[in-house]
Image (spheres, rainbow, N blue to C red):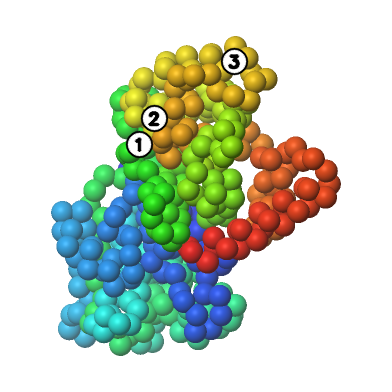
Amino acid sequence: MPLTAAQITQAAQDHVDEATYGQPNPGGDTKCNFFVRDVVESLLQQSRPELHGTANEIADALAAQPGDWSATSLNVEPGGTPQIFADALDQVNNGRIIVVAYRNPNGAQHGHLAIIVPNNHLYNSGTWGPVPYVAQAGPLHPGNKPGTDDQSVFASLELSYGFGIARRPGMTLYAYKGNSHLVSWGTARREFGKLSFTRRLASDNVDTDADDSTRVHQLWGIIGTVVTALGDAGNVANKKKFMLHLAWHEGARITARVQGGSGPARSFYQLEREKAIDAVAFANDPRNDWVGLLADSAGLGSDHTQPILDALDELNQNPSNPTFPGGNLIEEKLRAVDLFGTYMARIALKRSNDPIGTSNHEHAQYWADHWKISFESPEQKAQLIATFEQEADEVDQLL
C-alpha cells in the first residue's frame, strides 16, 4: 500500500512541536534538518542516512543519491517555476515525498530544508508566483508572515515565506523514488507475508563509547522507527522525546544496558522481569499483533515469533522474581539490542491510555506514575522527579 496524501499531511502535523524543533529565540539555532529527517523517516519507517547532518550536508547527500532521489533544480529561467511546482504538487497529492533543499553556496552559513505538503491549490505569491505549501522548522516569524511571531514550526506554510526568492538559484526539489509503505504490523504481515517491517537492523546499536550528542541522535533514530511501526499518532515528537528522556535517565545517559550493582533491570530503559512480561503479553494481544516486530527487531525474522513466546513462558514461571532466569532470550536481547529494548519499553508504556504531557515536568511526573511507580517516601519521589526533569532539560540541549 503506497503512501497517501493524508499520511504525508498527518506526519507533518504529528511533528509540529516547538519544544523539539522550534527556534528558542530570535537569532537562535533552527532545526529544519531534524524536522525533515524525522518526518521522512516516520513516513518511510526506516533510517535514511542521507538525511542526517546539517542542511547543506543533507542537500549534498540527496544530490549524490540519484537512484533514490530524483532532482529538479529551481535554477531555471524566470517564469519556469510555476510548472515545476504544479508538477511537484500533483506528485505529493498522489503520495510522493518531495524535499525542498536550499544548498547555501557559502558553506559556513546555513542552508534550509522543507517538505512539500498536499493541498488542492498553489499559493499565489507576489515574489515567486504560484508556490506550494511546505512543512518546515525554521526561524520564528518566517518571512514576516502575519500572526507567526511566536511560531517557527509549521505543518503547512507557503513556500515563499520559508524560502526567500534570492535563494531560488541554490534550491532543488528531491522526490523520493523508492517504495513507501505505511501500514500496521498486522496489515503488513497479512499482505506481505515475510516482510521485514522494522527495516532497521537489529545490529544498529548505539555506540556507548561515542560522545553524548552522537549517542542521543543514534537512539533518537531508533525511537523514531519504533513509534512509527507501533502506529503512535498525535504529537509523535512528544512521545519520542519522552522515550529519549526515559533512556537518558534510566540508562545512565544512554551508556548502561545492564543495571548497576548487579541489579536485574535491562536495556537503556531498565526493564525488570515484570515489565518484560507485561510488554510481551501486550504485544501478543490479538488487537495489537506486535510479537512479529519484537522477533524481527531481535534478529530472528518477523515470522519466527515462537522463541519470543517461549521466553515469555519462562518468565511467567516465577513472575514475582525481578531477576531474569539464565539464558532467557528476552533478557539477552534487552541487554544486547537497542531496537528490541526500545520496542519493549514503548509497548510496556502503551498499556496505559493516559496521555503524556508535553513539558519536561509532566514527563517526569509520567515517569514516576507509569514507570518507576514505587518510591521509599514522598520526599524521595519528589527528589527523583526533580532529577528526571533536570536530566530531561539536559538531554534536550543535545537534540
Amino acid type of the residue that numbered disc 2 sits on in the rendered structure: Ala
- The residue lying furthest to the front in this view is 261
Q: Can residue 351 be seen in this snapshot?
A: yes
x and y, in percent, of residue 289 in the image: 49, 26
**SS for dot 3:** helix
- For image coordinates 17% across by 62% down, the residue present is 64
Q: Which residue is mark 3?
A: 316
**SS for dot 1:** loop
Q: Are marks 2 and 1 in contact (CB under 8 Å)?
A: yes
Q: CA distance from mark 3 to mark 1?
A: 25 Å
x and y, in percent, of residue 136 in the image: 43, 68
Locate residue 353 relative to residue 117 in the image: left or right.
right
- For image coordinates 65% across by 20% down, the residue present is 321
Amino acid type of the residue that numbered disc 3 sits on in the rendered structure: Asn
**SS for dot 2:** loop
Disc ID at residue 202? 1
x and y, in percent, of residue 337 in the image: 41, 36
Q: Which residue is mark 2?
A: 298
Could you say which quadrant of the image residue 377 lies in? top right
